[in-house]
Amino acid sequence: MNFDLTEEQRMYRDAVRNFCQKELAPYADDVDKTGEMRWEAIRKMPELGITGLMVDEAYGGAGLDTVSAALAIEEVGRACGSTGLSIAAHNGLGCAPIMRWGTDEQKKKFLPMLTSGAYLGALALTEPNAGSDLAGGVRTNAYQEDGCWVINGHKAWITNPQFAPVINVLVRTEPEAGTRGFSMILVEPDRKGVTIQKPESKMGLKGSPTQQITFENVRVPLSNTLGEEGKGFYQTMQTLDGGRITIGALSVGLAQAAFEASMKYAQQREAFGRPIAQFQAIQWMIADAEVEIEAARTLVMKAAWLKDQERDFTKAAAIAKLKASEVAEKVCFNAIQIHGSYGYSAEFPVERIYRDQRLMTIGEGTSEVLRIVISRRALQDHGLI
Ligand SMILES: Cc1cc2nc3c(=O)[nH]c(=O)nc-3n(C[C@H](O)[C@H](O)[C@H](O)COP(=O)(O)OP(=O)(O)OC[C@H]3O[C@@H](n4cnc5c(N)ncnc54)[C@H](O)[C@@H]3O)c2cc1C
């Protein structure tokens, strides 16, 4: 395996880094405090393909490989966690399923809007009583009537719906068929019967809207079915595999930002007549962060690379997301420790980054669920189940 970045990938990462450090990082605090995303920056993102990382150029995307897409998400997350989550969800959950399973007509209709920088995409899986256990818990359902799907139900914790021109919605279309009874339906939020609630009040990622959606007798043409009817659960699992690489990359970006802020602070802050960076206890935290971030980034890159090689990447993506999210927690915890009281103050970025990163071990597969996925695959790999 060759994990070295190509010259093109390196140049792309650097261009995205420059953009994000100029257009997002200086405003990340405002985004957190106001709960408003910086649309001025998002509208400029199509120039670098950030709003359509892996969408074909024909639909306004950048047509990039997964490694480049992961590099971009890391940079967005490093500059602003809220924007990072919304852009990660937009690409991985909003655009990716349409790009993969959409008909030509669906792609032509929705992807140019999604890549334009004027909207953000969304995927609605979770419900008030269904998170990790989607198969057992999803109640949102759809039945056919007069050439339409009629959708009823309630989704919760959905990223971006207020900005979405279309939402990919997981519904039960055949209640008795178990995991074969789900379908994915494209629902435009301006259809009669769709209600999007105001954003949840959250611990972090405050600029990224997380909302409930209610569907009350929402009629959608059958032509809005995404991919094959009955394949919705399979599509969900495939989408989450890709999304886990993205959340892994975002976690690395958040950890990197907290780490850099801590090193800078450790050089400036003095105690006992010298910069605290000269104390071994601080140096060890710096060393551990350097090692762990490097390990997490390598795992994310490996999963992305496997996907680009069209090899099985389910276990690799789960490992990458599990490791990167747990590294982010540890690195951000220590970042506050290195800052002392100032780290606990909203005046310093590590306080915000610590709150932002906390989602990473929960969204798109909790750490516990990922351990189930990894252990099952490990036992299979060893021929034990
Ligand atoms: C900011 C934010 C953004 C989100 N964005 C989206 C989005 O865009 N689209 C979307 O569909 N969803 C989204 N979600 C929802 C998110 O994906 C779910 O919250 C997540 O999947 C966990 O589900 P849950 O919250 O229902 O937890 P639960 O499934 O109720 O889990 C609760 C606890 O029980 C543990 N647990 C559950 N089952 C097992 C088991 N078998 N073994 C061991 N432990 C177990 C879990 O690991 C966890 O610790 C978002 C959530 C947040 C907070």
Image (cartoon, rainbow, N blue to C red):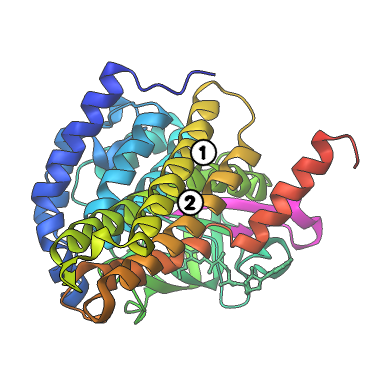
Q: Residues within 10 Å of mark 2 (few under 14, many from 20)?
A: many
Q: What amino acid is at disc 1?
A: Leu
What is the span of residues highlighted in magenta in the rendered image? 171-188
Q: Residue shown at 9%/54% (left/top)?
A: 40
Does the image show residue 113?
yes
Quarter of the figure with the C terminus: top right
Q: Residue shown at 38%/38% (left/top)?
A: 70
Q: Element type at marker 2? A: helix
Q: Is residue 361 left or right of residue 136?
A: left
Quarter of the figure with the N terminus: top right
Q: Residue beneath label 2, please?
A: 324
Q: Element type at marker 1? A: helix
Residue 100 is situated, as x and y percent measured from the top left of the image, at 49, 34
Q: Is residue 198 left or right of residue 264?
A: right
Q: Is residue 129 above or below residue 230?
A: below
CB atoms of marks 1 and 2 within 8 Å = yes
Q: Residue beneath label 1, please?
A: 299
Q: Residue shown at 39%/73% (left/top)?
A: 211
